[in-house]
Amino acid sequence: MTTKTTKHPPALFLPDLLGQSALDIGASALFFDQIGFDIPMFLQPEVIEHFNEIGIAARETKSFTETAFVMAAELFKLAQEDSLKTQDLLRPLFEAKLFLGVLTVHFIMRGGRELLRSQTKGIFSPIASQIENPAMLSVAAREFVWHMHETYLELEGDVQQVVQYVEKDVRQYQTPLQFLASFICHRLPALEGNPGPVLTNNRLMTDVLAAIGKTVMSEMPQKQQNINKEYLAFTLFDLVVQPFAPRLDGKIPEKLVRLQTNRGSELNALRKHVRDIATKLLEDSCDRELSELPPSKLGGILRFIEHA
């Protein structure tokens, strides 16, 4: 039996919260030592209390603002139910501490929301398209609930001022649902200060993450280089193991725990191989694009990994 030790910071699953989308990351569950999932809850009961207090005041507006609060409350409730159901399905992975429940919140305040709006202005279309995605609606609802709490604090508990702020904000969007979708962006500051890698299975959101990432990483070239190495390493790893990494339902979580426990040394060796290869590949390529590398070299790497 292999004793498991964590050598890398947990990967943070973004932008989704813990929910059904977590069942589709089988390869990632084998690559990372641990994965952290944000859960749709708050430690401070006053967060919900403030949201409900503002929501009651919003009823008087008889406008999109009232609708947004009603929708957010229902979506947040559904997100919590989905999270509990998913955690039960993945219980073996949580009990083995391969998966972790985390709580990340960011004090963005009103000024920070304006900054995020300007940063994502050119890519709001892919964000708005996420209103059809239940996982993203869960994110939007949680972030809206939190933003109401922080705005309540910022305005020193003046509920009417908070409602007026929301009334002005919501007018910038065509529908209450589009307004809520804009709060998906409030998850993006989690990129800053995150000590570990970021994991996503949402292809549209990779454009959004990349746009914010350019700003965050522009003055941190060394961190950008480390991210490139980790991304390339995972890409190679994924090519090899994806056919053998089924959806994480049924008995699969238990099997994955046994694999991590009984074959941990081989998994660690495979992870080390792809990380070493990624480092050498990037160093050898210098300023060349990856596409300029001979296909035979990549083919040799994959054959090496398969037989490791």
Image (spheres, grey):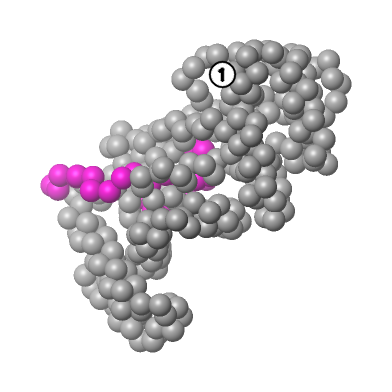
In which quadrant will I find the C terminus? bottom left
Spot occupied by residue 79 in the image (x, y as percentages of width and height): 58, 31
**Which quadrant of the structure image shows residue 222?**
bottom left
Q: Nearer the viewer, residue 106 or 23?
A: 106
At 74% from the left and 18% from the top, the residue drawn is: 161
Spot occupied by residue 260 in the image (x, y as percentages of width and height): 25, 49
Q: Residue 26 colored magenta?
A: yes
Q: Is residue 143 above or below residue 291?
A: above
At 84% from the left and 20% from the top, the residue drawn is: 61
Q: Which element type, helix, strand or loop, lies under badge 1? A: helix
Label 1 neighbour load within 10 Å: few <14, some 14-19, many 20+? some
Spot occupied by residue 181 in the image (x, y as percentages of width and height): 69, 41
Residue type marked 1:
Val
Q: Residue 256 colored magenta?
A: no
Residue pushed farthest right?
A: 62
Q: Is residue 165 above or below residue 114?
A: above
Q: Is residue 300 above or below residue 116?
A: below
Which residues, given as a range, are shown in magenta?
1-29
Residue ID for mark 1: 47
At 49% from the left and 17% from the top, the residue drawn is: 44
Spot occupied by residue 136 in the image (x, y as percentages of width and height): 61, 42
Q: Is residue 86 visible?
A: no
Q: Is residue 29 above or below residue 302?
A: above
At 25% from the left and 76% from the top, the residue drawn is: 304
| Horizontal side of residue 302 vs 13, given as left or right | left
| Horizontal side of residue 294 vs 125, given as left or right | left
